Amino acid sequence: MDDSEIPLGATLKRFRLEAGFTQRQLADRSGVSLSLIRALEQGQRQTAQIGSIQALAKALDRQIDELLRKAQALPGESPDAGIVAIRRVLTSVDDLIDEVVDDDLEPVSLLDTSRATTYAWGCYWGGKYDELSRLLAQAMVRGRAAEHASSAHERAAAVDQLAQLQQIAACTLVHLGHPDTAWLASLEARKTSERGDDPLRVAALRGTVSWLLLTQGRYEESRKVAAKTAEKIDVTGKVTPAALSVYGNLLLSAATATGRDIELKDDRARQAEDFLIEARETAERTGERKDYEAPFGREQVTMQTADVHVVTERFGSALETAKLMPRATRLPLAARMRHLTDVAHAQTQLGMNKKAVNTVLSIAASAPDWVRHQSLYKQTVAELDGRQPPTKLHELAVSIGAKRTR
C-alpha cells in the first residue's frame, strides 16, 4: 500500500504515536472529541469536518494537507471519488426521504462552517484543487446541516456560508475539468444565496456564473450576465466600498468575455476597453480590496487588462501592461500565477523564448499544484518545449502532461 492509499485515521494514528500522545491527550490538546479520534483511527469514520482536521493538525504540529494528502484515496477508490461525492451532495434527495446528517460525533455549528469556508477559500486561491475535491462534499453537507440547525438570528449567516461552499465547488470543478457538475454547483449556490439577505452575494455569484459561461466559450452570454448584473448595482451617491468592488469585478468579467468574443470581430478590443476604462475608474475609488472573497483594485484591473491584450493578440501591449503590476502584489497566488501565465504566453508569441522559459519555470516552482490544471499554461509549456532540445522545461512538460509541439 502506498501513501496515497492510507486512510485519514491511519495517518492520524501514525502522527499521534510519533508525537507520543495517547488518544485522550490528543483530544485534550486539540479540543476534538475522544470519540471522533477513536472512530477515525478504528476506521469507523473516514473523514471529519475541516475544523476538526485543522485542530488535530495544529495539536500534532503538522500541516493540514499532511493529514489529507496521505488520505487522498481509500483502497479501491477511483481518482474521481471526491468528484462523485460532490455530485451526490449537489443532487441530494435527503429532503425527500427525511435523511439527516449524523452529527453524534461532531455537532454542527455555524462557527465550524465558517472555519471550513475560510479554509476552503484559502485552498482555492492557493490552487489546491485536488485537496478541495476531497473536502468539499462533506463541508457542503455540514453547511446544509448548519443552516437547518441555525436559530432565526443565525439563519442568514448560515445560508451565506453554504452558498460560499457551493460557489467554491463550482469554481474548483471547472479547474478539475467537470463543467457540468460545476454548473450544478453554481445553480445550488445561486438558489442558496437567494434564501439569504445579501443582494451583493447574489451579484457576486452571478459574476461566478459569468466566468463559468466564459470557460464554456459562451462569451456573449457571459458578457451579458456580467453587464446586466453590474447595471443593477447603484454606484452613484453614497455607496459602500464592497458594492463598488463587486461592481468593478463584474465589469472585468464583461471585459474578458468581450475580448474573447470573435463574433464581434475587430470591435471586440474596443468594446472590451470600454469596460476596462470604467473598471479602472472604479478601482481609483476603492483602492486594493477583497470583498466577497474576490480581489479588486488597480492590480486586478492590470491583470485583466493584460488578459484582454493577450486574447486580442496584442502581445506587446500585454507585456507593457504587465510592467504596471507591483512586484509585491497583493493578489492571491492563483491570480498571480494566472497573470504570469499571460506574460509567459505573450513572451512565447513574441519569440522571447528565454524569458518565457524562465517565467513558466518560476510559475511551476511557486504553484506546482495549480499548474497541473491550467490549459493555457500547458499549451505555453508545450510550445516552448517544441522549440528547443530537452531541458528542465521538457521534464516539466512531461510531468504536467503538456504535449510537445514542433
Image (cartoon, grey):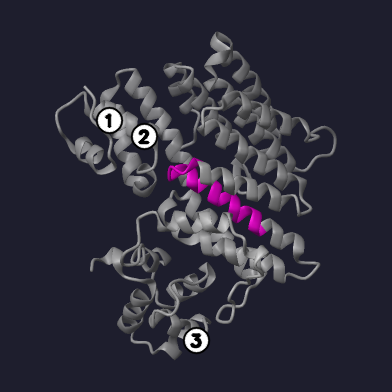
The first of marks 3 and 2 along the sequence is 3
Q: Tell which residue pokes out farthest to the front in this image.
A: 97
Residue 329 visible: no
Residue at figure coordinates x 38%, y 76% from the top left: 9
Reading the image, the residue beneath label 1 is 382
Reading the image, the residue beneath label 2 is 377
Q: Report the magenta residues as a range.
A: 161-179
Residue at figure coordinates x 66%, y 34% from the top left: 250
**x and y percent of residue 53 in the render?**
47, 71
- Asked whether, in this view, residue 246 is left or right of residue 62, the answer is right
Report the Cα–Cα distance between label 1 and label 3. Answer: 51 Å
Relative to 286, residue 144 above or below: below
Q: Which mark is residue 393?
A: none
Q: Could you tell me if the residues under marks 3 and 2 are in contact, i.e. CB atoms within 8 Å?
A: no
Give the quadrant of the C terminus. Answer: top left
Mark 2 residue type? Tyr
